[in-house]
Amino acid sequence: MNYQISDESKPDKTQNERIKKIRESLPDKEQSEIYANKLKALSDPTRLEILYLLSDGEMCVCRITPTLDKPQSSVSRHLNILKNLGFIKSRKEGVRVYYKLTNPKIANLVKELIKLI
């Protein structure tokens, strides 16, 4: 898409070079879509609560559900979304499923984002 810019608002050579560098560093459309989907997942209060809970370490669904005071089916759905997007991982031990963050930095990131908002 090309927009017409009046002569007085056209960027000079230095600005053009800076804009070119910024454009080159931008993620491609596909990667931007992936990032946007991951950020959308964080916009759900239940998912944020789950990430907060897991920031303290691995936890069984049998503990997450009563802590959040939500139906297990709802909690499981949110856990699957977070797992599919790579925020958390699971392991099964007998009949119990345990979840933990894939990267401990995720908890810090969520907390920092909330502080910024």
Image (cartoon, grey):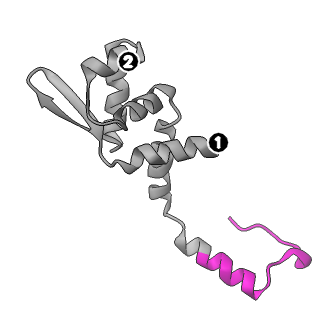
Q: Could you tell me which residue is drawn at 38 percent across and 27 percent down?
A: 78
Q: Which residue is mark 2?
A: 67
Which residue sits at x=51%, y=47%?
36
**Residue 41 in the figure: left or right of residue 89:** right
Where's the C terminus, which quadrant? top right
What is the quadrant of residue 115 in the picture? top right
Q: Farthest front residue?
A: 56
Q: Examine the rendering and report whether any part of residue 30 can be seen.
A: yes
In magenta, the rendered stretch is: 1-21
Q: Position of residue 40 (x, y in %)?
A: 51, 39
Q: Does residue 43 lie above or below 70 as drawn?
A: below
Q: Which residue appears at 34% of the width and 34% of the height?
A: 54
**Quarter-wise, where is residue 97 in the image?**
top left
Regarding mark 2 in the picture, which secondary structure is present there? helix
Q: Is residue 31 magenta?
A: no
Q: Residues within 10 Å of mark 1 (few under 14, many from 20)?
A: few
Mark nearest the camera among 1 and 2 is 2
Q: Amino acid at mark 2?
A: Thr
Q: Is residue 9 magenta?
A: yes
Please tell me the numbered disc located at residue 117: 1
Q: Residue furthest left?
A: 94
Figure check: 13 above or below 31 = below
